[in-house]
Amino acid sequence: MTVEPGGATTAAPHTYEALQPDQPGGLVQLLTPEGERMEHPDYPLDLTAAAIRDMYRDLVLVRRIDTEAISLQRQGELGIWASLLGQEAAQIGSGRALNPDDMVFPTYREHGVAWCRGIDPVKLLELYRGVSHGGWDPKEHKFHLYTIVIGSQTLHATGYAMGIQRDGALDGDRGEAVIVYFGDGATSQGDVNEAFVWASVFNAPVVFFCQNNQWAISEPLEKQSRIPLYQRARGFGFPGLRVDGNDVLACYAVTKKALQAAREGQGPTLIEAFTYRMGAHTTTDDPTRYRLASELEVWKLKDPIERVRAYLVRTGQAEPEFFAAVDAEAVQVGARVREACRTMADPPPLSIFENVYAEPTAILREEREQYAAYLDSFEEAGR
Amino acid sequence: MTTLTLSKALNAGLRKAMENDPKVLIMGEDVGKLGGVFRVTDGLQKDFGEDRVIDTPLAESGIVGTAIGLALRGYRPVCEIQFDGFVYPAVDQIVSQLAKMRYRSRGAISLPVTIRIPCGGGIGAVEHHSESPEVLFAHTAGLRVVACADAADAFAMIQHSISCDDPVIFFEPKRRYWDKAEVDTVSGAANALPLDRAKVALDGTDVTLLAYGPLVRTCLESALAARQGGPGPGGPGNGHSIEVIDLRSLSPLDMETITASVRRTGRCVVAHEAPVYAGLGAEIAARVTEQCFYHLEAPVLRVGGFATPYPPSRLEEHYLPDLDRILDAVDRTFGY
Amino acid sequence: MTELKEFRLPDVGEGLTEADIVAWHVKPGDQVEVNQIIVEIETAKAVVELPSPWDGTVARLLAAEGQTVDVGTPIITVDVSGEPAVAGNTDSAERSVVPAPAPADAPPAGQSPAAEAQPERQSVLVGYGVKASSTTRRARKVSAARPETAEVPTGSPVPTKPVQVPAPPAAAAGPALATRALAKPPVRRLAKDLGINLAGLAGTGPDGTITRDDVHRAAGGATVRSEQEAEPNGARTASLAALPSPAGEERIPVRGVRKHMAAAMVSSAFTAPHVTEFLQVDVTETMAAVRRIRDLPEYAEVRVSPLLLVARALLIAVRRHPLVNSSWDGDAQEIVVKHHVNLGIAVAADRGLLVPNVKNAGELSLPELARSLQDLAETARAGKASPADLAGGTITITNVGVFGVDSGTPILTPGEAAILAFGQVKDAPWVVDGQLAVRAVCTLSLSFDHRIIDGELGSAVLRDVGSMLEDPVRMLAWN
């Protein structure tokens, strides 16, 4: 249901069709589902063919890793996995728009953005396997740890952006910006709204990137908002826009522009990437209980990878050898991930006691020593 | 040496911290222009600017969440939660994020955030302005929890908390904000006890009385009254020599100082404003009993609030432990 | 050569414990590839497709369609010995956007990464979530230091090994001397009850703590063992007897009656708060009454002494103040008021002090009471008092006058609330009607359990007995 200015409501659902670029409130789209290039006056695209081929490779590999992880969970090698299936373009597009010094605050599903930041996918598996709570150094990759509490990271991102301001690091092209990812469900959380308040009144250089994949576990978007999500920004006083989340080129373009605006001191932007969660919320979820297969079929026709392949083929910007090489690389990546996961060692038991504080307290030291002695008292080393 | 109120001592300590480290920021509701509802941050925005002393929007979770972001960026934010009863919206950010991020990142992330919270009752206030929520945070691994009791410690401990690389929940006894004491504003911080140590505030031989924050003064008054009371029933305290210890650090607890004292006296009483039920006194009692079992003449007794919400202010004198209730507990330890 | 791998049913839903096999997608002999769907299972949450972890040939299906299988149970074995898989769908370009993984290319023969990757790990992790916990203890090392020992007074909570714990000022090996005496609360209580000062005692317990035995020893006399050792004349103290006693001292083994008396005294004295009240009574009229009763034919065969009238007076006083005939039940937190009076009389026998009692003394006539008292005393003195005689008393009289003393502070018989002692009857100056006179005077001492009987009641009882002895007509009037 949409609310028109003046309060009248129409029964139109948040459907893709209702949001065609030429419709009011339509999406920004630069590549149709069939692979045709569109132009948008606000978002000129300056990507080379090589860059677009690179993005295609990113999309394929990221999907391969994702499906491999699902299998590993089904084989008992991971406790759980949150799949990004269907959302690859939103993540690769926005991820490739970042400067190296920009800081990223993800949720727990941004494996595509992690890929763009150079995080080894095996590190993501550590978390879902239960070996660590997040295996990488945020400063090294400018990619914060995964945050499981819904929406919390929007405040962290905003505070970080306020720090950039205080560092005087807003400097046009060489400046730093922040991007924070969250979903449609998260927009209901108090913390996200507080982040909007902060970012707006302090004019913080943060891009709020919302992947609206239509579902928060079993709850559809209508349960989270009466109005299109990108319009929420207006209420807080900063710009919002909606982009085709399955269009890697459009996601790239709008994110690049929003980051630039942030870097130039123009403050925050809300980007609503309109996409679809093709898989389950996580591997413990069963979507057949709350959504129709027909909906899935409709979105299959808007596949983010298919349209790029079609575009490359149609425009002659990629040879069959290229696609074969990408496929072969995908198989290898899958195999590597599989093997690394299965051979991943459990952390040593006494590591439980590490890194609670900068220096362990007396009580922690005592507990650690007691437990070490306890473990040592058994004939056979146990678990 | 300067005579300062506790509030002014905090102000002086904050000022020193900000002078020493340009990364120190102060943020909270009304901390800038107004200087804080208790004037603890008075004058700081004028001297250090709006970028460093920030009047935030009215949202506690937002205050702590953005402070985390600033800390990730390399700053040392000092947040103010205006009143104890208003920390609850921020508990998720404090417990799920602030406390756990070092552990989550296996040491890669350090969040040197200080959260200042005026706490405790005795000021005749309406609801939510007299809470003692310290146990929630003491029970959360990854946080340090401290409570200052006098102006000299306030001056030193706020600086120690800010320079500490761990997140610190810093409780200030709001009914003692106007208590005055001598403060060494030159080397007070350097000479003070470390942040994780307790202080023997008054020597004694017969019973160890533990307290923190607002009740330290009450316990000192109790101990002095006990000395003057003289032996025999009727006189308060019956002439017992009470050793008063100001815990200062609630997490971690300085068990070394506590047990050394109890092993000398053989008796222990803990006093806090927070309800006795599941309060910090329970943890102390369990540890003291375990570590001093053969020295104890009596069980560890606790004095504190009732297992009720904080009452309307006309009744708060009945709720808050006072000199009589504390000395009563001391008497009871001698009844075993 | 076959190399079989077992695939165990994983937990696919955060704590699920079982699943039903819905449909097999393969059969024995089929080639399978990594991630190829081999089976559909149904859990409490969803229908889930399971992909194969390996390339290989299906050897055996270990569970049937429709069967419910626990998580962790092997459901299929696959021969991964390296037979090259039949070329599957080589076009694995992931065209279709399907939640299930597409089949992967078959790797070259003998290089199945899965097989190479896990020489040690035959089985798949058994799920996450609800793990079966052990029902037996794991074996401990034999030479390991004892596990959690008694509390170590040094304060270090690490009992097994000396570890580098920030140690508080540790108690020295002779703690009672250097610092506070160390003792558990029950031992402190015992010391307090027995009036022993712990400071200066050398403790024989672990780490210099003071034990119960240490306290008893300091209290003087041999150790009183628990009631479990009920051997009246046992040879327990053979070792003691065998000790050569140093010159100047004699050791008397505590056995039998003396042992029980001691135990009873301790139990009573240090459990019930005793208060004793005294009353000097002019018993001239009672003595006269005794003489006159003696002359009556009904009492020809029986001994009549002041004890008889004291007993009678006490019995009447009990009827007037029933609460005095009761006992304290600490466990139930109740005072048990007895409706019958089993009047105990303290008897000095050869073996020691005995307190046999006359059952239902309150119902007896005076001659019967006299008879009972006499029989009781004779039996007890002859050493023939039965356990039944000695048990069940509700109130006691003790005649300390026979020892030539005036009064005493009698100790309650365990389980009773009051005991009346009366001393010797002797002539003494007394004021009668405002004039000095010589009268027969006796002191009554009433000890009572102050948990049950307060001063007012105790005094009332004592006064009543005194009044009756002063004027025996009152016994008639109040009966």
Image (cartoon, coloured by chain):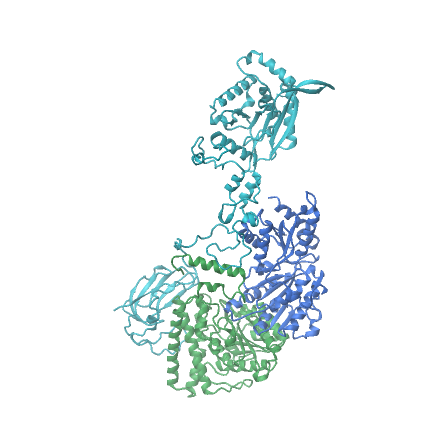
Q: Residue furthest left?
A: C1
Q: On the rendered image, what quadrant is the N terminus of chain A found in? A: bottom right
Instruction: Say which residue appears at 48% left-offset and 37% top-offset.
Output: C226
Say above or below: B314 vs A309.
above
Residue sitting at the far right = C434
Q: Please state if A82 lies on the left or on the right of A265 as rendered.
A: left
Q: Residue furthest front?
A: C247
Instruction: Say whether residue A266 is left or right of residue C120.
Output: right
Q: Where's residue B149, x and y in %?
A: 66, 59
Above or below — where is C65 with respect to A145?
above
Numbered marks: total:
0
Residue C242 in percent (x, y) is at 43, 35
The front one of A129 and B295 is: B295
Identify which residue, C63 or C66, lies in the foreground: C63
| Residue C424 position by quadrant | top right
Residue A7 shows in the view: no
Supply the letter of whichever chain is cyan.
C
**In the rendered picture, chain B carries what hue?**
blue
- Res. B321 in view: yes
Residue C430 x, y percent position in the rendering = 70, 20
State the quadrant of the C terminus of chain A.
Answer: bottom left
| Occupied quadrant, residue C70 | bottom left
Q: Nearer the viewer, residue A242 or A142?
A: A142
Residue A223 at what x, y percent from top left?
Answer: 54, 67
Occupied quadrant, residue A189: bottom right
Q: Which residue is at the front of the view, B62 or B158? A: B158
* Chain for colour green: A
Work out whether B194 lies above or below C179: below
